[in-house]
Image (cartoon, helix red, strand yellow):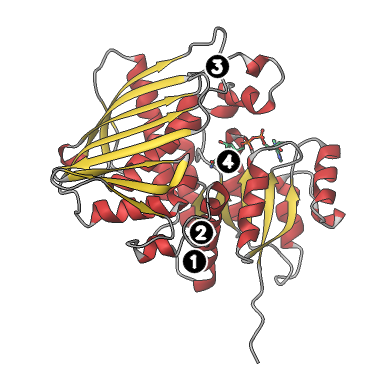
Amino acid sequence: MQQRREKLRYGMAGGGEGAFIGAIHRMAAAMDGEWELACGSFSSDSQRNARSGAALGLEPGRVYPDMATLLAGELALPENQRVQAIAIVTPNHLHAPMAISALEAGFDVVSEKPMALDLAEAQAIAAAVRRSGRRYALAFTYSGYPLVAEARLRVARGDFGRIRLVQVEYNQGWLSRAIDTEGNKQAEWRTDPARAGMGGCLGDIGTHAFQLAEHVSGLRVEAVSADLTTHVPGRRLDDDVSALLRFEGGARGTLKASQIAAGEENGLKIRVHGELGGLEWSQMEPNTLTLRWLDQPTQQVRAGGPGLSAEAMERTRTPSGHPEGYVEAFANIYRSFAQAIRSGEPQTSWYPGLGDGLRTMAFVDAMVENSRSDVKWTAIPKI
Ligand SMILES: NC(=O)c1ccc[n+]([C@@H]2O[C@H](COP(=O)([O-])OP(=O)(O)OC[C@H]3O[C@@H](n4cnc5c(N)ncnc54)[C@H](O)[C@@H]3O)[C@@H](O)[C@H]2O)c1
């Protein structure tokens, strides 16, 4: 008789009613039947916390007022009931303290980006990962898309020759007005340095753009030349970011991230060019990867369609033409993390984690330092 596979149990910090990303994590974790939500601390407001837990069908005893109580409560349960991992989907200032306490209590962690408020905090998380021997995944969502995996693979196997250019842009328009002072919860904490970190748009979406640029090109950025601007009067953090990038091996790049590009939705796009050709992928058209050549017509490959690698196919759930997107990309990260936990291996090859987190926080630090000085280039340490 077949042995029944137990779902992995996880708890959630943040993601209460009205929150954005917590619900996406719950859908993604549930998608492949790998994960089951078993406890949470969804809000620092006790009424909202209780309502959120009840709406998700949790036992009242497993809806905890805060992270410390959650960890103690779960550790008091028998191992076959206790959660194995904690998903952290709160504003940024809670990522480091929550991740460190969860890791040290013996739980694996899936955290939202940015990893922490700054590089020093990120290094403290890395130290906790090493001390505890637990696993740590970061929700750099865009590396979960099948055609991002395809793009990375085609660059790595040399289809385009030596890489010369990497251009990444991430344009949103939702912070074009001062909605942070008009009661928009998501905007309010994102523009507060104490809860967002040193970067506004930079930390929120610039980190996604940077991670995607390094992930697809396979190259590390060695130095940045930055221009951080705040367009909306009174706003305390940047809302518009431009940077020149110098990559190892001589490639050059540009990074543009803006949250005041009025009318834009979630315009993340990357282009990578080598000596022989290049590729283009856009998050709002995620099931198409465009390939351009010096000496051949332009090609398009499609998610689920012919010509794709095994890496891209295993991240695809439906036949081509049945659109997959954001939630499925998130689900690919949860599925890969589940496989790593079940296999007992310390780290599988591709889910985003410590390396991506440390690199992006070093990027944020270098961008802020560079934009405050008259120095043309600021180095990003090799991490
Ligand atoms: N990977 C992605 O694509 C992506 C997209 C959006 C947001 N994010 C990240 O997700 C995180 C949350 O963003 P959001 O837009 O969902 O924010 P949000 O304001 O919508 O939700 C934050 C949630 O955290 C809860 N919270 C705050 N303090 C808490 C505490 N002490 N204990 C328990 N819960 C607490 C709030 O009640 C709320 O439910 C941020 O770090 C953000 O950068 C990532």
Q: Quadrant of ligand 1?
A: top right
Between disc 3 and disc 4, the foreground one is 3
Q: Are marks 2 and 1 in contact (CB under 8 Å)?
A: yes
Find numbered disc 2 in the image and state the secondary structure of the residue it sits on: loop
Note whether ligand 1 is within 8 Å of mark 1: no
Q: Amino acid at mark 1?
A: Ala
Task: Give 40 or 132, whichever is nearer the viewer.
Answer: 40
Where 1 sits versus 221, above or below?
below
Please state, as top left, top right, bottom left or bottom right, where the C terminus lies in the image. Answer: top left
**SS category of the residue bearing label 3:** loop
Residue topped by disc 3: 176
Q: Amino acid at mark 2?
A: Arg
Q: Where is mark 4, residue-wise?
A: 95
Assess whether mark 3 and mark 2 are in contact (beta carbons under 8 angstroms).
no
The residues bearing labels 2 and 1 have C-alpha atoms spaced at a distance of 9 Å
Using the numbered discs, state the Cα–Cα distance from disc 4 to disc 1 in whole angstroms. 22 Å
Q: Which mark is residue 160?
A: none
The secondary element bearing badge 1 is classed as: helix
C-alpha distance separating marks 4 and 2:
15 Å
Does label 4 point to a residue whose CB lies under 8 Å from ligand 1? yes
Q: Which residue is mark 2?
A: 135
Label annotation for residue 340 = 1
Asked if residue 270 is positioned above or below residue 34 in the image, the reply reads: above
Q: Earlier in the sequence, mark 4 or mark 2?
A: 4
In what quadrant of the picture does the N terminus appear? Answer: bottom right
User: Image point 25% across, 45% down: which residue?
Assistant: 298
Answer whether residue 348 is visible to the viewer in this image: no
Tag in front: 2 or 1: 1
